[in-house]
Image: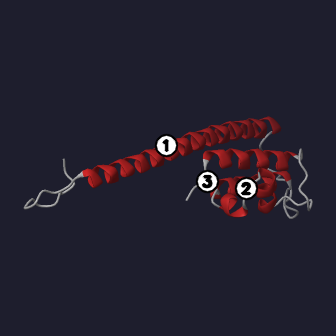
């Protein structure tokens, strides 16, 4: 089950505002429930956007480093790490855009399927068998 494109955009905006601190949740906590409240959608609606919930959790974890994590002592230079981070951010933004496009396409296909189903139902309702004829098979 998915969430509508309109509600998806509202949730994405709420995530951005909550993570960057431009909006403060009522209880001061960065929770998925507060994302739904800020977006103005029900928690049930927000819960259907599983991918956004995972993105939200990932972004929160990035902002708040784990207390047990220690800085690595690897041999990579700062510029190598910065390049890798830039590459990954670029890849992430491309994947997000692809996801948005695919979501739009899926919604359009669902709507088209619904329209075709209504049309087929309406067309089948217009068929009246003549006495002695076999019922329509649905093939044309």
Residue 100 percent location from the top left of the image: 60, 42
Look at 66% across and 59% down and name the residue there: 45
Identify the mark at residue 41; answer none if there is no mark.
2
Kind of element beneath mark 3: loop
Task: Name the N-terminal-most of marks 3 and 1.
Answer: 3
Q: In this view, does 52 lie to the left or right of 130?
A: right
The alpha-carbon separation of the residues under discs 2 and 3 comes to 10 Å
Against 47, residue 20 (above or below) is above
In this rendered view, identify the residue nearer to me: 49 or 77. Answer: 49
Q: Which of 38 and 53 is in front in this view?
A: 38
Q: Is residue 82 left or right of residue 88?
A: right
The answer to the question of whether label 2 and label 3 lie on touching residues, with beta carbons closer than 8 A, is yes
- Given this view, does label 2 or label 3 mark the residue nearer the observer? 2
The answer to which of marks 2 and 3 sits earlier in the sequence is 3
Provide the residue designation for mark 3.
3
- Assess whether mark 1 and mark 3 are in contact (beta carbons under 8 angstroms): no
The 10 Å Cα crowd at callout 3, few under 14, some 14 to 19, many 20 or more, is some
Left or right: where 75 falls relative to 127: right
What secondary structure is found at the residue carrying circle 1? helix
Q: Which label belongs to residue 108?
A: 1
Q: How many labels does the image show?
A: 3
């Amino acid at each position: 089950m998915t969430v509508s494109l309109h509600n998806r955009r509202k949730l994405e905006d709420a995530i951005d505002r909550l993570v960057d601190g431009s909006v403060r949740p009522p209880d001061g906590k960065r929770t998925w429930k507060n994302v739904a409240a800020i977006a103005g959608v029900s928690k049930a609606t927000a819960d259907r956007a599983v991918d956004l919930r995972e993105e939200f959790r990932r972004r929160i974890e990035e902002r708040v480093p784990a207390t047990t994590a220690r800085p690595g002592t690897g041999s990579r230079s700062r510029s190598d790490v910065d390049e890798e981070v830039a590459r990954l951010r670029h890849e992430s933004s491309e994947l997000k855009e692809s996801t948005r496009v695919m979501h739009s396409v899926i919604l359009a296909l669902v709507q088209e399927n619904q329209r075709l189903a209504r049309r087929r139902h309406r067309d089948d309702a217009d068929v009246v068998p003549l006495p002695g004829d076999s019922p329509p098979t649905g093939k044309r």
